Amino acid sequence: MRIAICVKEVLDPDAVNNYAIAGKLEIGDDGKSLTQTTIPRLINGFDEQALEAGLRIKDADGDTTISVLSIGPDPGKILKQCAALGANSLVSIKSDTAELDCHGFASILAAQIQKDGGADLVLCGRQASDDDQGVVPALIAEKLGMPLVTFARAVEANGSTLKVTRVTPDGDEVVEVDCPAVVTVSNELGEPRYPTAAAKIKARKVKPNVVSIADLGLTDADTAQRAQLKQQYVPQIQGNCEMIEGGSPAELADNLMARLRAESLLS
């Protein structure tokens, strides 16, 4: 089985939240981008889950190959992490991500997958932590003419068929889909594995295949923005804490319940 996995480099969401809580998150003069340069960049967490799903399939079938694709000015760091974990090939697609919307990302990724000869399975994270839209996988599926299965907590391959366990508000749902297909993976898959020190050292020597937009035969119209970011702002965060007093645990509980009822939070 040939698996293509799409990964994205994002700002560390924990660091972004810490800056926001401390009131130190600032938007630049363009009104669209952050000014902080010390926030680390890393692989999108849901994309790590997608890679883990692919590696589990590879563990079960040694003939499986995994190709990891990423778009950006220099996604080499996260691609080397994928190599250390067991990816067979890496593709770095050079582009200014600020000039792309979801359609642009999907057009580029779909074109690269086609250029590589297609894939039996395309895995993506359910969404990216920086925009939380989750639209790109659906657009990739549309452009490649593949069925889409979302919110997977488990993906099993059986020949040319996939068994996917989906997370839904009403519980798990198990579906089967013929390959080729696009599957988005959720964090319910479980903890992703970590590369060993030896694998990290070996991955330093792995060079990704660097591709430009021109190499893919795409026109400006193919990657033109259909939705443009006009403004980004940091919301005001305000927290209030009220201490409930009481001479004993029972009195504290009674006072808490009384206050909740007074606020109509309990009947």
Image (cartoon, rainbow, N blue to C red):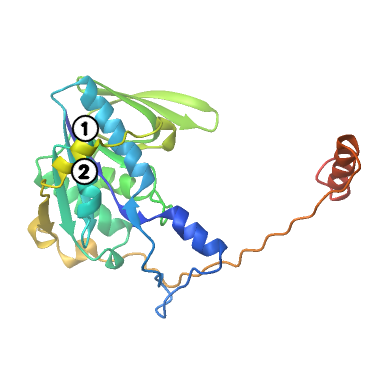
Dot 1: within a 10 Å radius of its alpha carbon, few (fewer than 14), some, or many (20 or more) residues? Answer: many
Name the image quarter holding residue 190: top left
Residue found at the far bottom of this picture? 29
Relative depth, front residue between 195 and 64? 195
Look at label 2 and name its amino acid.
Leu
Q: Classify the position of the C terminus by image quarter.
A: top right
Q: Classify the position of the N terminus by image quarter.
A: top left
Relative depth, front residue between 13 and 66? 13
Report which residue position mark 1 lands on.
Answer: 180
What element does badge 1 sit on?
loop
Report which residue position mark 2 lands on.
Answer: 144
Q: Is residue 173 above or below residue 142?
A: above
**Can residue 80 be seen in the rendering of this structure?**
yes
Question: Residue 10 at x, y = what percent?
Answer: 35, 55
Look at label 1 and name its amino acid.
Pro
Residue displayed at 68% across by 60% down: 239
